Image (tube, helix red, strand yellow):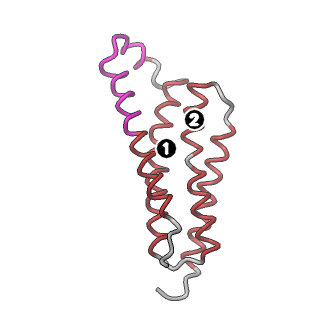
């Protein structure tokens, strides 16, 4: 049976990316078409408006990283113990943009943002180690 570690990263990465694309359309609507767009634009560099743009950008970035990491995990002969940790940590990295949105819309504390950021950095470091320790491709 072929290694399937990374499949979830690709599937969830694509799904989350689609969600943040739709969220981007909402942000475009608020900036360009909403009746009170001038107030939205005036506040776009501070507070919740700025945070919502950060969530959109990081959501798409971390989705792309999950897709790339998943593809690499599916195709490269990375040690299974590294591969599982990379996969789980990269998926946990999606907590960063979701945490930003939870702060903006639900008033939750920033803990999810920190967990997601640390997870994605850790996944990147572990993937680098996994790739560098491949004996033969």
- How many marks are shown on the rendered structure? 2
Disc on res. 44 = none
Q: Position of residue 44 (x, y in %)?
A: 45, 23
Q: Is residue 7 above or below residue 120?
A: below
Left/right of residue 82 with respect to residue 9 in the rendered view = right
Q: Are the residues flagged by discs 1 and 2 in contact, CB closer than 8 Å?
A: yes
Location of residue 22 in the rendering, given as x and y in whole percent from the top left corner: 37, 35
**Which residue is drawn at the image coordinates 43% and 54% (left, top)?**
64
Q: Residue furthest front?
A: 1
Q: Residue 36: horizontal and vertical position, in percent?
A: 37, 11
Q: Main secondary structure of the magenta part?
A: helix
Which residue position is annotated with label 2?
100
Label 2: element kind: helix
Residue 44's place in the image compared with 77, above or below, is: above
Residue on which disc 1 sits: 58
* Boundaries of the magenta span: 21-40
Q: Residue at x 31, y 21 (%)?
A: 32
Q: Is residue 8 left or right of residue 32?
A: right
Q: Secondary structure at mark 1?
A: helix
């Amino acid at each position: 049976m072929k290694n399937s570690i990374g499949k979830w990263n690709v599937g969830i990465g694509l799904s989350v990316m689609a969600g943040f694309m739709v969220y981007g359309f909402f942000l475009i609507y608020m900036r360009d078409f909403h009746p009170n767009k001038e107030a939205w634009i005036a506040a776009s560099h501070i507070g919740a408006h700025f945070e919502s743009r950060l969530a959109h950008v990081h959501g798409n970035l971390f989705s792309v990283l999950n897709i790339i990491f998943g593809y690499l995990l599916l195709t490269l002969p990375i040690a299974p113990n590294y591969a599982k940790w990379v996969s789980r940590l990269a998926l946990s990295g999606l907590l960063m943009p979701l945490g930003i949105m939870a702060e903006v819309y639900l008033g939750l504390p920033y803990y999810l943002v920190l967990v997601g950021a640390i997870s994605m950095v850790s996944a990147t470091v572990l993937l680098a180690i996994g790739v560098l320790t491949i004996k033969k491709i």
